[in-house]
Image (cartoon, helix red, strand yellow):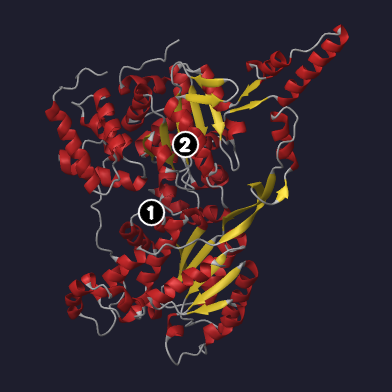
Amino acid sequence: MTAPTATSPDDLARALDETGYLADAGLASAAFLALRMGRPLFCEGEPGTGKTALAQALSEALGLPLVRLQCHEGIDAAQALYDWDFPRQLLHLRALEAAASASHTELDVDAVESSLYDRRFLLARPVLQAIQEAPCVLLVDEVDRADDEFEAFLLEVLAENSVTIPEVGVVKAATPPLVVLTSNRTREVHDALKRRCLYLWLEHPDLARETAILRRRLPDLPEELAAQVAQAVQGLRGLDLLKPPGVAESIDWAQALQLVGARRLDLASATATLGAVLKYREDADRARDKLDALLAS
Amino acid sequence: MTAAAPPDGDAVLSDFVAFTRLVRNAGVPVTTDRVAAYLQALRLSDLASEVATYWAGRLTLCADPDDVARYDHAFAAWFSADPRDQRMGRPAPPKPRISTMAALTDPPPGSGADGDEETPELRVAASGEEILRDRDIAELSIGEREHLRQLLALLRPAPPRRRARRRGPARRGEPDPRATLRAALANGGEIGDLRRRARRVRPRRVVLLIDVSGSMSPYADTLLRFAHVVTRRTPSAVETFTLGTRLTRVTRELRQRDPERALADAGRAIPDWSGGTRLGEVLRAFLDRWGQRGVARRAAVVVFSDGWERGGADLLGEQAARLARLAHSVVWVNPHAGKSGYAPVQGGIAAALPHVDRLLAGHSLATLAELLEVLRDA
């Protein structure tokens, strides 16, 4: 099996478009170059700018399985790379002992030992799974949440496309997986990791693109409502909120408006559904005061 | 590969390598391996399309949103026309080299046009730092302030630390049964060595509250720069607010790497420069909106203020007590405290003082360095 090839960024953008993900020139070039150069793609940006969705769309557009590694504080190699299945190894030992005592034969110690570290007792965690299943898309989500020691584990994988298991040897991917790393920038990721990646900084989409995204994700949404929601969300982002709404929120909002049967975005319907787009009380208070002006524009 | 195969030849290649040099001069840390990646990306891109060449460089040479702005600037200069589509089509911001903040704060009396003439000596004088370290910031000339800025950028604050709730593997500490057993299983059931665990250590949150009212205006610029230095060290663990007639959160602005951009953005965000002070009310707003919800809890809080209060001193005292109950430690930095003959008798500071752990001076570089030491041990 070989990695699927896109012949140009435009090609890839079209394929992504078919899955419902609208990619601009930068995004398409980034994904194209990541694919062709065999480099991981490091996506940074505000929450809700579509970093995780990009990996999902890529896996769908390229027809590759998606392997996801959600990072969290305290994640270690046993959770990310591989682990041995200790209970099954013990069971295996007991079974051998029982069989030996039943048939009154001596156990061959070397054979038993080597049988313990068989591939069938190896639990493939996401990274090893991605290496074995490649070609595939490996999503390392929110890498800034993991401890910085964890980045060191990723380095070998990202540079060599291989995982070293002392008992088994080096597992190397036949074709490198397409790796997408995302970060919300809660801390700086180490430069050694960034150096091996293509760096993509994602911003909130502009009005036209956001309208297009809404129309694409919610086909039943009236065009006027989509434009109004996009306009209002753009306005909300300029209000210096604790958590400016992302694209995910504007999709939620449009969906909520649709569900309450609103044909256009007016003060009543906006107030009723504000909870879909603003998730902090202070933000909602602040927005409510300025909603009039926002909707009028 | 796109239709236009890269016109081979060293001339084109060296052109692009020269461009990376320009990008490096613009302040992006471009390394050789990044240049190699850039050339590889160019080989796969349609060189006839400026959009494609723009993105090939941006994706391989940048590593930070700050880099992107600098790269845009360099690209615009190199390829004259801005090739990005309309969405990205904002004009690349020229890199602000001179802070707009300096103009926002009143030049101190006595320093005037003659200030600039002192700059060259100060830059070269080996004892420049010694001279500046103990001088009152309010009395510095414009040239000396410029020098002070550079000295501030050299400060390396050690963040305060606290014990975390979670335990992690450690060399010494209590035995860790789970890890020991796990290691034993990996050894085929033999207990090799005893694994240990201990409480982990995390950076303690630092909250900087900076008074930007009229009476503090000679210090405000320097204090914000100081806040930027502290913020850059542990961006996620430092929160900065300015106090005046209202409360402004400038944390987000100060997290940018470039001090001039951070300061300019913070200056734009603050609506009440050199206005009056309603310390008590603003402190209450901070505690209601931020402090009580978690920002001040177990944090090391530093209040930079001279304690001049227009509102009632009672309210300030009450809120200072609230702050002290929430925070791990409260340090009050008063620029006047370093002056001889100072006594904390003004209504505001007198009311707050009983609830403050330390009162420091903070009117000069030396006292700010001392503050960093106090913070480290907080």
Residue bearing the label numbered 2: A182
Q: Residue at x 21, y 27 (%)?
A: B49
The quarter holding residue B299 reads bottom right
A91 relative to A16 in the view: left or right: right
Q: Residue at x 61, y 67 (%)?
A: B327
Seen in the picture, residue B195 relative to B281 is either above or below; the reply is above
Evaluate whether label 1 is on the same chain as label 2. Answer: no
The quarter holding residue B113 reads bottom left
Residue type of the residue flagged with mark 2: Thr
A106 relative to B308 in the view: left or right: right
The C terminus of chain B - image quarter:
bottom right
Q: Residue at x 56, y 62 (%)?
A: B289
Pick the residue in front: A75 or B178.
B178
- Crowd class of label 1 (few under 14; some 14 to 19; many from 20; radius 10 Å): many
The N terminus of chain B - image quarter:
top left
Disc number placed over residue B256 in the picture, else none: 1
Q: Say what secondary structure mark 1 lies in.
A: loop
B39 relative to A76 in the view: left or right: left
**Would residue B201 be seen by someone viewing this image from the given angle?**
yes
Give residue A92's position: percent from left, percent from top: 76, 17
Q: Chain of mark 1?
A: B
Give residue B339's position: percent from left, percent from top: 42, 87
Pick the residue in front: B313 or A85.
A85
Q: CA distance from mark 1 to mark 2?
A: 19 Å
Give residue B90's position: percent from left, percent from top: 27, 44
Give residue B269's position: percent from left, percent from top: 38, 61
Pick the residue in front: A163 or B71.
A163
Residue type of the residue flagged with mark 1: Gln
Of all residues shown, which one is farthest toward the top?
A103
**Would residue A264 be seen by someone viewing this image from the given angle?**
no
